[in-house]
Image (cartoon, rainbow, N blue to C red):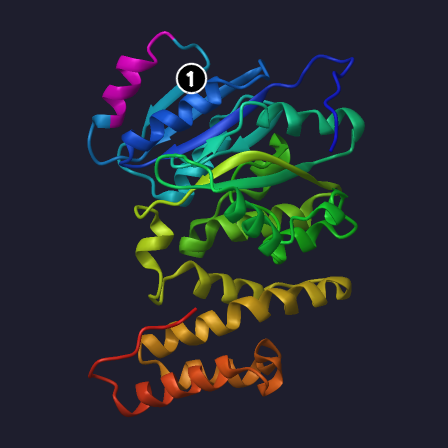
Amino acid sequence: MFTLSTPSHPSPKVSICLPTCNRPELLVACIDSCLAQSYGNLEIVIGDDSKDKRTQQLIAQRYANEPRIRYAKNQPSLGQARNVASLFERARGDKILLIHDDDLLTTDGVEKLVSLWARHPQLEVAFADQYEADHSGTVDFDASARLNTAFHRTKDAEGLQALPGRCGLIQMFPNNGWMANANLVRRIGYKDQYGMCCDFTFGTELCLAAREVFYLHDYVSVYRKTATSISHSTRGTTVAATVSAYAFVKALKLPPQLEPSRKLALRRLAPIVVSVHAKNRQAVLGSKIALTHLFAYNYGFSMRLYYHLLMLSRAAVSPVSGHTSPRF
């Protein structure tokens, strides 16, 4: 566990970028967690992509006298990626932190992250652990431990990362609750051509571009599991985040030292993509991916391969009738 230190130079300003869309009932808790930060030099930049005026009215009524909040209503709506990109451009801070409207920050989350720059002046990106919570924000501590372990966030991994780009490729880097130098964030930007996996592609490109990335084995944010997320609504379809992430990882030009990280990423992504193609009756494409990524199925010593091949064969002979739901 790291102790927080007070830098001798003026504390950097942190811009908390908060995209929101049609979820005012979740947004309030998120904003309040940002306002409750133990770190003082910050602003909360909100981009509202909502179709109605509920969020706009809520901000006006509840936070009219809060100078740290800078709110903008997007007219017309920008979409997920362009909304986040616009927040990055509007940010005035030295550091940028992203938090989504259905998630939360721990009270000392910003302070824990920003303090890392005092010990590592060349640092460009920092991230830490996430709690997992239900819709109401109640934390499940066992699930939180499993979540971070699944994404390679463990005690033995703490510190400056020897291969910064690896963090993004293997999804060690979280989708929010991270902090980075504002100039680097704006240089990378959120790109809308990647669809639902813009979080993943941004994190990967950010880590690939950074000179130094630090992982802190401590909790700074809360991931709330909600049924209204965009990724949840598109899961199992051909526009699912996993399908786009697979194509992105396959196409990346990487130095030789990061090829094992690419393989690790594809080991996770390829079977899910095969399952998606089987569900959507794309038997030829699904079979090709399965057979060219046998390492993802332990080279045939995995029952998952034969289950997916069975799904694909059913899709091939029954292109119109019912289909089997994928088992990820």
Corner quadrant of residue 274: bottom left
Q: Position of residue 195 (x, y in %)?
A: 40, 55
* Label 1: element kind: strand
Question: Residue at (42%, 21%) from the top-left corner?
Answer: 32
Which residues, given as a range, are shown in magenta? 55-65
The quarter of the picture where the C terminus appears is bottom left
Q: Position of residue 12 (x, y in %)?
A: 65, 19
For disc 1, the marked residue is 69
Outermost residue on the front side: it is 142
**Between 222 and 88, the one nearer to me in the picture:** 222
Question: Residue at (30%, 46%) from the top-left corner?
Answer: 228
Left or right, residue 195 beside residue 247 = left
Q: Is residue 207 visible?
A: yes
The quarter of the picture where the N terminus appears is top right
Question: Residue at (46%, 14%) from the top-left corner?
Answer: 68
Q: Is residue 61 above or below residue 127?
A: above
**Between 61 and 72, the one nearer to me in the picture:** 61
Mark 1 is surrounded, within 10 Å at the Cα level, by few (under 14), some (14 to 19) or many (20 or more) other residues, namely some
Left or right, residue 42 beside residue 162 = left
Q: Is residue 88 above or below residue 65?
A: below
Q: Position of residue 52 (x, y in %)?
A: 19, 32
Q: Is residue 261 magenta?
A: no
Q: Position of residue 83 (x, y in %)?
A: 39, 37
Outermost residue on the bottom side: it is 317
Outermost residue on the top side: it is 65
Main secondary structure along the magenta-highlighted residues: helix
Q: Is residue 7 above or below residue 173?
A: above
Identify which amino acid the numbered label 1 is placed on.
Ile
Q: Is residue 170 above or below residue 29?
A: below
Q: Is residue 251 visible?
A: no
Question: Residue at (76%, 49%) from the top-left corner?
Answer: 156
Corner quadrant of residue 212: top right
